[in-house]
Image: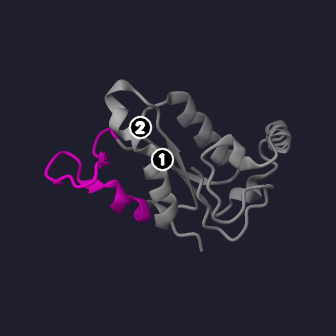
């Protein structure tokens, strides 16, 4: 998901409050690819786009390449970047509804989303279905809907 609460993002297709959960959400895929290739040719030509903006990457599953490439891309576009590894260390978030919060997860995702959105202009979420994450994956579309609904888009 990408959620922007800024007034404008100069790249074509990345408008105010847009959410991207599927490649089809980009609109014309060929135009998006051409734009990406243009940015890749001159990675630092678009630093003004991310100036004074913050990208939060929320990882439900670790991924070295995804984390590093996304963080580097954000920095190339002039953004500040933050990473939240949800199931690692002190950053565990509860995703099940109706759970008594007396375990090792100090925050519920429903309470955390508005906090994350209040500090960030763009939120990227990475989750991948694994056998031990079947419940999270089956509820993923609901979490994406909630993230979009609870994120401010002024």
Residue 45 placement (x, y as % from top left):
82, 49
Residue at (13% x, 52% y) in the render: 102
Q: Quadrant of residue 23?
A: top right
Residue at (42% x, 59% y) in the render: 113
Relative height, residue 141 to residue 37 (above, below): below
Residue located beneath label 1 in the image? 141
Residue 131 placement (x, y as % from top left):
35, 25
Tell whether position 10 is magenta: no
Residue at (46% x, 65% y) in the render: 150
- The stretch in magenta equals 87-115
- Element under disc 1: helix
Q: Tag on residue 128?
A: none
Decide: few, some or many residues near mark 2? Use Cα within 10 Å; few <14, some 14-19, many ≥20. some
Tell whether position 91 is magenta: yes
Residue at (64% x, 47% y) in the render: 74
Residue 11 placement (x, y as % from top left):
78, 55
Magenta-highlighted stretch: main secondary structure?
Answer: loop
Q: Is residue 74 visible?
A: yes
């Amino acid at each position: 998901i990408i959620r922007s609460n800024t007034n404008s993002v100069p790249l074509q297709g990345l408008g105010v409050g847009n959410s991207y959960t599927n490649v089809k959400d980009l609109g014309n895929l060929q135009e998006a690819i051409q734009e990406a290739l243009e940015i890749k040719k001159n990675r630092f030509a678009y630093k003004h786009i991310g100036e004074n903006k913050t990208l939060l990457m929320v990882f439900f599953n670790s991924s070295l390449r995804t984390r590093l490439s996304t963080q580097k891309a954000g920095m190339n576009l002039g953004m500040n970047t933050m990473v939240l590894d949800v199931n690692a260390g002190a950053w565990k978030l509860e995703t099940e509804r109706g759970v008594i919060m007396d375990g090792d997860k100090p925050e519920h995702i429903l309470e955390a989303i508005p906090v994350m959105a209040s500090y960030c202009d763009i939120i990227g979420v990475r989750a991948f279905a694994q056998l031990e994450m079947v419940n999270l994956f089956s509820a993923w579309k609901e979490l994406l809907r909630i993230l979009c609904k609870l994120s401010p888009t002024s």
